Image (cartoon, helix red, strand yellow):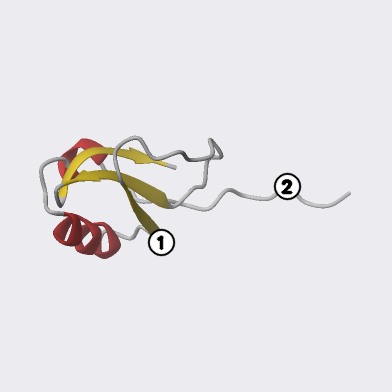
Amino acid sequence: MSPLSTPSSQPDDAPEAYVGLDAAGAERLARERGWTTVRALAPGSIITMEYLAGRLNFEVDKDTVIRCWKG
């Protein structure tokens, strides 16, 4: 029997702290806090619903983060 895989760790961070920041500054801060994958999406972007530990998603409108979530 193979061992159970352990999920990737992710920073203990509050996504709402990024709302209102400019996109470049938010990405820089997220990477400093340990997020391995950061992606910026336009409002209404079509995305898949798979969860990826270690990823932080930004919804960005006019260079400002308006929504942020993990996975």
Any mark on residue 4, and which?
Answer: 2
Tell me which residue sits at (29%, 46%) in the image: 58
**Towards the viewer: 6 or 19:** 19
Looking at the rendering, in which quadrant would you find the C terminus?
top left
Q: Amino acid at mark 2?
A: Leu
Q: Position of residue 17 (x, y in %)?
A: 16, 41
Tell me which residue sits at (35%, 57%) in the image: 35
User: Label 2's element?
Assistant: loop
Question: Would residue 26 be visible to someone looking at this image?
Answer: yes
Mark 1 closeness class: few <14, some 14–19, many ≥20 residues within 10 Å:
some
Q: Quadrant of residue 70?
A: top left
Q: Which of the two discs, 1 and 2, sits closer to the camera?
A: 1
Mark 2 closeness class: few <14, some 14–19, many ≥20 residues within 10 Å:
few
Examine the rendered structure and indicate whether residue 48 appears above or below residue 5: above
Q: Amino acid at mark 1?
A: Thr
**Sequence-first tag of 1 and 2:** 2
User: Label 1's element?
Assistant: loop
**Distance between mark 1 and mark 2 Cα atoms:** 22 Å
Tell me which residue sits at (35%, 51%) in the image: 11
Question: Would residue 12 be visible to someone looking at this image?
Answer: no
Q: Which residue is mark 1?
A: 36
Q: Quadrant of residue 67?
A: top left
